Image (tube, grey):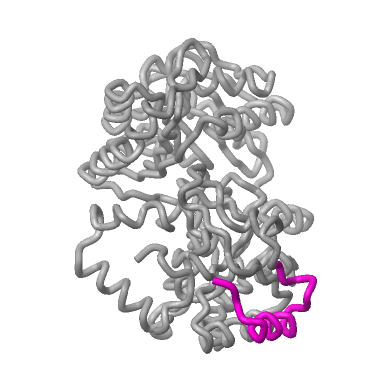
Amino acid sequence: MAFSDKIIQSLEKIVGSTNLLLDEERMIDYSHDEFSLPEIRQLPAVVVKPGSTEEVAAIMKLAEEKLIPVVPRGGGTGLCGGCVPVPGSMVLSLERMNQVVEVDADNLMAVVEAGVRLGDFYQAIEAQNLFFPPHPGEESAMIGGLIATNAGGARAVKYGVVRNYVRGLEVVLPGGKIIRPGGKLQKNSTGYSLLHLIIGSEGTLGIITQAIIQLLPAPNYYRTLVIPFQTLDEAIEAVPALFRAKIIPLAVEFVPKDVIQITEKYLQKTWPSRLGTTDLMIILDAASEEEMDVLSERVAEVCWQQGALDVYVADSPAKQEEVLAIRSQIYEAIKAETIEILDIVVPRAEIPAHVRKVQEVAQRYGLWLPTFGHAADGNVHTHIMRCGYQEGQCLPLPDEQWKPAVDKVRAELYRDGTQRGGLISGEHGIGLVKKPYLSLVLTEVEIALMQGIKKVFDPRGICNPGKVV
């Protein structure tokens, strides 16, 4: 649907002609996120790039008056179609609102605009020896998007997810009204928490334009341990043993050797472990070198007792960088053949059984389903691939083999995860892709309540329509 000249002129008046895209070629990048299948892609009617909250408010006022669907967009790094436009919609890109407004060291808070990229945020706070614990992985993601999806990452086991660090928000509602729930506060028992309704709402209730983020003093020391086990079960069983020993690592990842082999070839780097089938990558933080040495020894002792085959210590920055580079680049190494990345979350002890189900499904459908993730918080990332696997190589399959299997594989794994007391998303969100499966984990009453909340915030249904509920 093309917008009338009058609407286009009104948008130009708000953001300026250089911040308004109408050309299809320039709008292609705004038609999708990182979800790979092209079937969900959709060109918007227009892309607008506001530079201030006031401009966002003017856009939302116009959109509600003219019933224009508005799709907010951050870095476009999502994996479930959360920022994919609907036909005849306007993409509202926050990319120009990219200022770190304030780093308040006295209150350990930062005030940031929604378009600040995660990597730039880290740089700004690290310059003052401060620490934002969540690390969802993709540093080109924008703060607004991280909040809208309640992003997590590997550090959630010790420090929690993004929700735990958002103290205040500035949000433009449909119709252009602005609310500012929260503030530079540690406590708030004043009425319903509108702040936490917005966090994780995926742009369906309003447009996040600014956030107040809680910070921590930066840890002095980090260390990465790579600990191989003969089986996945042994690796996962070591995690509760660490907690029983009163050890809470910064992060604990389980990584099978198949994806490590492919990533080593892709990066031309060497992973330190050749033993076993599954490694735990454990990252520790500590206030002193002495504390780090004691903590590392305790982790090693517990893991030896649980059947570890060896303990590799990346105790220099160069060694740590190489290990973390391989782990962080697994997705890039297999991205070309990846159809979808699931983020099922199950109780931690259920990981081995769920992964065995993944392996059984993979064998039955003849697909490679590499699976790794956050061993300490139960977040399992199964990659649905368009290939098989043999001796460190991805073997492409014909379309007629993998295409009919994708929906069946996804549904089977979702059902297995939910039967184990889990949920279909631990950190990526629901978006467009997972919406059909929401009823697997939520009751009709719960979905109706969510729909009611959506209607209160967005009575005319213009804010990221078609997503979540």
- Residue at x 49% of width, y 82% of height: 67
- Please indicate, yes or no, whether residue 103 appears anywhere in the rendered image: no
Quarter that holds the N terminus = bottom right
Answer whether residue 5 is magenta in the image: yes
- Residue at x 61% of width, y 46% of height: 138
Q: Position of residue 329 (x, y in %)?
A: 61, 32
Q: Position of residue 342 (x, y in %)?
A: 41, 42
- Residue at x 58% of width, y 48% of height: 135
Quarter that holds the C terminus = bottom left
Q: Quadrant of residue 113?
A: bottom right
Q: Which residues are magenta?
A: 1-21
Q: Nearer the viewer, residue 338 or 74?
A: 338
Taken as a whole, is the magenta stretch helix, strand or loop?
Answer: helix
Q: Quadrant of residue 448?
A: bottom left
Q: Nearer the viewer, residue 60 or 294?
A: 60
Q: Position of residue 45 (x, y in %)?
A: 59, 68
- Please indicate, yes or no, whether residue 79 appears anywhere in the rendered image: yes
For the image shown, how many numbered marks are present on the structure? 0
Name above or below for residue 195 compared with residue 294.
below
Q: Nearer the viewer, residue 388 or 156?
A: 388
Q: Position of residue 101 (x, y in %)?
A: 74, 71
